[in-house]
């Protein structure tokens, strides 16, 4: 029986564990893949307090080491459901185990939507990125493509255009869907080329990332683009459906909660990229982890 069971080993879950252990609560973290979440795909992180520059994987390792030093338990298992009975929460996993806790913090994050092409996974973090804020500086004076046409994509493209030699904005629709104001900013940038009605059909099968093949939707015409890097901004995919009976989801599938990280189910809290929020960065995820952990501690102390 644990005081707090945390689902997800990204920055939000790891930070929650640190705060919970410092409050002398017993903690179990259940992570289905690898600890660190999306941050491990960033070759360098230069916007996290305390580190002038650090790789995402190294930052994740430091967080995990701190969690283990604090005495939290960790398991690599996939959570399939949470069942509440009185003051107990039963967390069931795909591996057939059931863990009991007084509270649960859901911090399972959200994954970036991928293009689903061969070679894509191989180049993630080494030519393919999902965050211009995190990785854009590494492509200064280089040529990149930004895949997507919504607000987030256009904002990323604007940021990239400030330092990159050339930025291709590639949208599968015949028009950009982002705000008109953002479109106007991009259209005034001489180093930006907007390509609509076009999809990425292939990624070059080379030892290092070197470019892509794009295909016009209307007639199938293919063109090869030589690139130094590619940024994919076609949305995030939350994986919250298994917990929809415990916490409300918004239309996009995120937990419909605010900065207090509370849900309608007593003893169940959410934190990080899995919840509805305006900004998704490692610093905002760790902030959520602290808030959720302290809320869970208060709940336990009041039982």
Image (cartoon, helix red, strand yellow):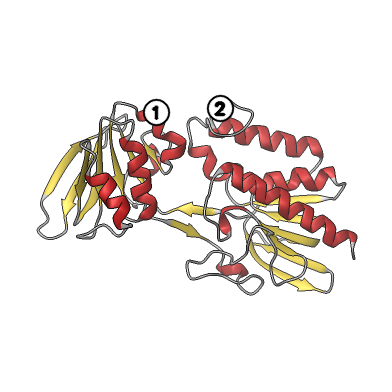
Q: Say which of 151 and 11 sits in front.
A: 151
Do the CB atoms of the residues marked 1 and 2 lie less than 8 Å apart? no
What is the distance, in whole Å, between disc 1 and disc 2 at their CAs? 13 Å
**Mark 1 lies on residue:** 138
**Mark 2 lies on residue:** 54
User: Is residue 297 depicted above or below 140 in this figure?
Assistant: below
Q: Residue at x 80, y 38 (%)?
A: 70
Q: Measuring from the top left, give residue 200's x and y in whole percent.
A: 24, 49
Q: Can residue 25 be seen from the camera position used here?
A: yes
Check disc 2 and report its element: helix, strand or loop: loop
Neighbour tally class for label 1: few under 14, some 14-19, many 20 plus, Cα within 10 Å: some
Check disc 1 and report its element: helix, strand or loop: helix
Q: Residue at x 79, y 58 (%)?
A: 296
Neighbour tally class for label 2: few under 14, some 14-19, many 20 plus, Cα within 10 Å: some
Q: Quadrant of residue 249?
A: bottom right
User: Is residue 220 depicted above or below 266 in this figure?
Assistant: above
Q: Measuring from the top left, give residue 160's x and y in whole percent.
A: 34, 37
Q: Earlier in the sequence, mark 1 or mark 2?
A: 2
Q: Can residue 1 be seen from the camera position used here?
A: no
Q: Residue at x 59, y 65 (%)?
A: 255
> Quick check: 189 left or right of 122?
left
Q: Say which of 303 and 38 sits in front.
A: 303
> Quick check: 102 left or right of 55?
right
User: Is residue 300 depicted above or below 146 in this figure?
Assistant: below
Q: Quadrant of residue 4?
A: bottom right
Q: Measuring from the top left, give residue 201's x and y in whole percent.
A: 23, 50
Counting the numbered discs, the total is 2
Task: Point out the image quarter for the C terminus.
Answer: bottom right
Q: Quadrant of residue 51?
A: top right
Q: Measuring from the top left, give residue 269's x and y in whole percent.
A: 70, 61
Q: Residue at x 14, y 44 (%)?
A: 223
Task: Point out the image quarter for the N terminus.
Answer: bottom right
């Amino acid at each position: 029986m644990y005081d707090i069971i945390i689902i997800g080993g990204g920055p939000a879950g790891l930070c929650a564990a640190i705060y919970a252990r410092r409050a002398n609560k017993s903690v179990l973290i259940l992570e289905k893949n690898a600890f660190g979440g999306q941050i491990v795909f960033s070759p360098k992180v230069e916007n996290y307090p305390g580190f002038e520059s650090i790789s995402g994987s190294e930052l994740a390792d430091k967080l995990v080491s701190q969690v283990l030093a604090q005495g939290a338990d960790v398991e690599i298992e996939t959570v399939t459901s949470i069942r509440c009975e009185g003051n107990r929460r039963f967390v069931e996993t795909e591996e057939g185990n059931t863990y009991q806790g007084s509270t649960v913090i859901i911090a399972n994050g959200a994954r970036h939507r991928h293009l689903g092409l061969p070679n894509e996974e191989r180049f993630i973090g080494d030519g393919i990125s999902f965050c211009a804020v995190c990785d854009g500086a590494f492509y200064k004076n280089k040529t990149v493509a930004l895949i997507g046409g919504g607000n987030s994509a256009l904002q990323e493209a604007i940021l990239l255009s400030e330092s990159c030699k050339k930025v291709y904005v590639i949208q599968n629709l015949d028009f950009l869907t982002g705000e008109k104001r953002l479109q106007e900013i991009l259209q005034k940038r001489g180093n930006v080329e907007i390509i609509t009605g076009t999809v990425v059909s292939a990624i070059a099968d080379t030892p290092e990332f070197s470019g892509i093949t794009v295909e016009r939707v209307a007639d199938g015409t293919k063109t090869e683009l030589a690139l130094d890097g590619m940024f994919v901004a076609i949305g995030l995919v939350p994986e919250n459906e298994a917990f929809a009976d415990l916490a409300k989801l918004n239309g996009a599938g995120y937990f419909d909660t605010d900065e207090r990280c509370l849900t309608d189910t007593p003893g169940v809290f959410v934190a990080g990229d899995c919840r509805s929020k305006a900004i998704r960065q490692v610093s905002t995820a760790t902030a959520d982890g602290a808030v959720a952990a302290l809320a869970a501690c208060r709940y336990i102390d009041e039982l």
